[in-house]
Amino acid sequence: MSQRAERPRLPLIAVYGETAASAQRRVVALLEAAGTSPAEAQRLIAAIQAGAVEGAHGEVIELDTHAPASSSDEFQEGWRGAIEAASGQLAHIADRTVRKARTAAAASEIPPAAPSRPQRSLPTAVDSVGEEQVHQVLEAAERIFVSLTGYTGYDRGLSEDILPVVLKAVSAEQQDGYVRRLEAFAEDNRERLAQLYGKYGPGGPFEDQARCYLTHQPESVVVCERLDTVPLWLDGVWNNEIDAELVLERFTKFWRFGLGA
């Protein structure tokens, strides 16, 4: 008796998996930095994922009318059966995605009877930053900035106006060790910072100091570190106290998207 030929496996989409996982981790981190609970962040991510599946579900249903016009009744019936099976499975996946997120979120929100470790507290905001702290951070930022650009023509008075505001996006718990944190950030991101200043900073091919003065100021190193750590917090304190929203917006685009070849 002849054996039935093995059916070839259908191709899998393997391009977006790791990208999606990385994007999800980044979004969850940003939401938590803005004060969103982990449970709520997971619910929001699940809702977006379910919406994407629902969009695919709608496109699959539209295939119901796309069977070859000259095909037989049997083919048409099989075509419709396949569409119904695929659309039904997609609807199930969307529902399951939201249901699992709700279940996990509900479980995470139940306080444990005997926690094995202290609960993580929210970072403590500061109303103002002392002159000594501003001075120490500015000295560190100047050393980093000058080592990367060789430029000393920045406006120190402007730095002393901007830095106390930017440092309000550093929690009370992190203020004492912030200079070390900034120096470690600069060391880890030295090449990226060099590209930023080389492209948009003093003498760079795309410098425009009038529209984005941060690229010519040493406190920009602190702005970069806070953009990578608590961007929404930084945006909030900046827009509340500095009448230059477009400057931060342009600088953010330079730092995040403008460093390509």
Image (cartoon, grey):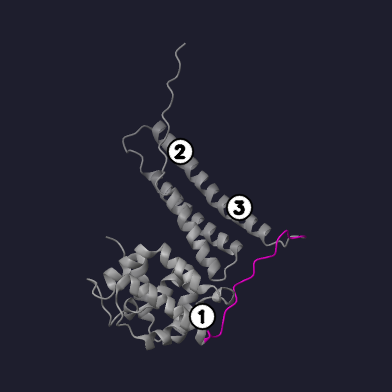
Say whether residue 16 is visible.
yes
Q: Is residue 213 above or below residue 256?
A: below
Q: Give the amino acid type for the residue marked by disc 3 in the picture.
A: Lys
Residue picked out by circle 2 = 82
In the image, 235 versus 223, the foreground residue is 223
Left-right relation of 102 to 221: right
Q: Which is in the foreground here, disc 3 or disc 2? A: 3
Q: Quadrant of residue 98?
A: bottom right
**Is residue 33 highlighted in magenta?**
no
Residue 100 is left or right of residue 201, and the answer is right
The quarter of the rendered structure image containing the C terminus is bottom left
Mark 2 vs mark 1: give the one in front.
Answer: 1
Residue 236 horizontal side relative to residue 119, left or right: left
The reply to whether callout 2 and callout 1 are in contact (CB within 8 Å) is: no
Q: Is residue 32 above or below residue 237?
A: above
How far from the left and from the top, in percent, is residue 84? 48, 42
Going from N to C along the chain, the mark reached first, 1 or 3, is 3
Is residue 119 inside the magenta stretch?
yes
- Distance from Cα at disc 2 to Cα at disc 1: 58 Å
From this viewpoint, is residue 220 visible?
no
Residue position for label 3: 100
**Callout 1: SS:** helix
> Label 2 neighbourhood size at 10 Å, few (<14), some (14-19), many (20+)?
some
Residue 4 on image: x %, y %: 45, 19
Relative image position of residue 172 (x, y in whole percent): 58, 77
Residue carrying label 1: 168
What is the x, y in percent for residue 173? Answer: 59, 74
Q: Residue visible at 42% across and 86% down?
A: 160
| 187 horizontally vs 119: left or right | left
